[in-house]
């Protein structure tokens, strides 16, 4: 490779240097000064927070529905003196209470 460069004439060396000079100058690392508003990070974070809130609200809403169904099942099982159905209904009620408490539990743990 060095032999080929040595065989270049002065005009060819100037042309070669002129061709690679802009690439070397523009190829240097430059610091980009950008404001936080222009990066779009806050919009993404706000969107994720809204989506998280929506999902947790849906889980709590489904928990309220399961709580109502579990209480109705427990009342029907209690009036029929059916202990098996009573235990199943109690499990539904406990599961529903956990679903309702999920947003508060996640906030307490710091996950949200």
Image: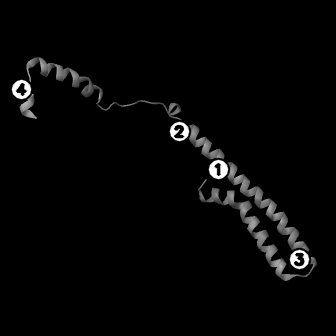
Q: In this view, does 35 lie to the left or right of 83?
A: left
Which of the numbered marks, if any, corresponds to residue 52? 1
Task: Give the image's coloring scheme.
Answer: one colour
Dot placed on the residue nearer the N-terminal end, 4 or 3:
4
The spot of residue 71 in percent (x, y) is 85, 68
Dot placed on the residue nearer the N-terminal end, 3 or 1:
1
- Given residues 38 and 80, the one toward you in this image is 80
Disc nearest the viewer among 4 and 1: 4
Which of the numbered marks, if any, corresponds to residue 7? 4
Q: Dot 1 surroundings within 10 Å: few (below 14), some, or many (20 or more)?
A: some
Q: In this view, does 61 lie to the left or right of 71?
A: left
Q: Dot 2 surroundings within 10 Å: few (below 14), some, or many (20 or more)?
A: few
Q: In this view, does 92 lie above or below 54?
A: below
Q: Mark 2 points at which residue?
A: 41
The spot of residue 14 in percent (x, y) is 14, 19
Dot placed on the residue nearer the N-terminal end, 4 or 1:
4
Q: Dot 3 surroundings within 10 Å: few (below 14), some, or many (20 or more)?
A: some
Q: Dot 4 surroundings within 10 Å: few (below 14), some, or many (20 or more)?
A: few
Picture residue at 93% right of the left edge, 77% below the top: 79
Instruction: Give SS at disc 1.
Output: helix
């Amino acid at each position: 490779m060095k032999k080929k460069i040595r065989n270049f004439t002065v005009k060819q060396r100037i042309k070669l240097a002129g061709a690679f000079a802009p690439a070397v100058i523009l190829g240097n690392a430059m610091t980009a000064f950008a404001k936080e508003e222009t990066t779009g990070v806050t919009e993404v974070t706000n969107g994720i927070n809204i989506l998280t809130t929506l999902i947790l609200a849906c889980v709590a809403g489904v928990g309220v529905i399961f709580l109502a169904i579990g209480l109705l099942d427990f009342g029907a099982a209690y009036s029929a003196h059916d202990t098996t159905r009573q235990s199943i209904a109690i499990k539904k009620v406990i599961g529903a209470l956990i679903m309702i408490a999920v947003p508060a539990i996640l906030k307490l743990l710091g996950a949200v």
